[in-house]
Amino acid sequence: MNIINIAATDKTPKVTLNTENNTFEMQGNSRPENVRDFFYPIIDDLKKYFEKLNEEKLEVKAITFNFKLDYFNSASAKFISDILLIIQKYANAGFNIKIYWYFDDGDDDMKEVGEDFSEMISYPFNFIMVQR
Amino acid sequence: MKNYDVVINHKGAVSLSVVDYILHHLKSFLNHKVHDKITRKRVYTLSVECLENIYRHADLKDEDETLVVKYPPRFIIEKISESFIIHSGNIILNNNISDVSERIEKLNALEQDDINDLYKESLSKAEISEKGGAGLGLIVMAKTTGQKIRYDFEKINDKFSYFAMQLNLKK
């Protein structure tokens, strides 16, 4: 079941959170007209998801986060960092979390920003280069 | 003679649909004329940040609207050989001049590594304003160009000035 299920537009990414395979995915471009209206509900749902897992002591083997972003503006970067801080909190609490950061072959800046994020939360990312 | 192109030349109000129109036009130019993927992405990134700044700060009250006719927002991209110059301009409250110039001067005084550190530090600390800005735009500009940000304020009257900024992106 997807507790987050947002379709992509030209300006906003596709975002899903599937509770069957415990996978969060964000894919596409991000420069929403109203960045708060777009990201706040996602962040709320993600927090609720983790709180539920935590309270009910549910056995989850691994939680996967896939970031497959082509472009995001600076305001979106702030919210992506908020999402990563939530991940950091629950990783520190003992959850097995894997973060995959996808970037196009040749888009070194996208890889670098992933490295910045990884450093920011002191948590390893798996970098995956995509050939286009 | 170096290859010269004016990629975008916009003077006038900047609404969301104008931002979309300019970015659409820019994307098509970049895809057709610029081979290097990193340069394409960087020009796009800088343009979004400039245009969103102009859009967010276009908050003149009705009585000041006539000023916009005389001092319209400006967004120009020039391509000289493989390098780009991005000019942006908008009216700014005189009260905000010292804040903006301090922020730019601080960035201009930093080395690239320090700018990257400042970016990482600012990401987690950033607060989103009512207007949807995270205060990260100028840092992204300094980080993306690796060059000093050139800027100027031209006084219009006791309340407003015109803020002009120039970003250089060298290949």
Image (cartoon, coloured by chain):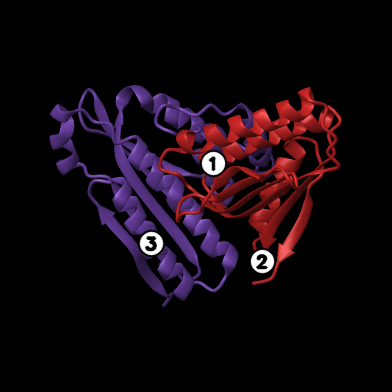
Residue at numbered disc 1? A76
Have a look at marks 2 and 3 and say if they share a chain: no
Q: Return the chain for callout 2.
A: A
Q: Is residue B46 left or right of residue A84?
A: left
Kindly identify the residue that appears in the image at 52 percent across and 64 percent down.
B40
Label ID, residue A110: none
Q: Secondary structure at mark 1?
A: helix
Q: Secondary structure at mark 3?
A: helix
Q: Quadrant of residue A90?
A: top right
Instruction: Out of A82 and A18, give the one closest to the viewer.
Output: A18
Q: Which color was chain A given? A: red
Q: CA distance from mark 2 to mark 3?
A: 22 Å
> Residue A56 location in percent, x, y?
79, 25
| Residue found at the very far bottom of the displayed protein | B1
Circle 1 Cα neighbour tier, 10 Å, few/some/many (<14 / 14–19 / ≥20): many
Residue type highlighted by circle 3: His
Is residue B171 something that shows in the picture?
A: no
Label ID, residue B24: 3
Query: Which of disc 1 and disc 2 is earlier in sequence?
Result: 1
Residue type highlighted by circle 1: Ser
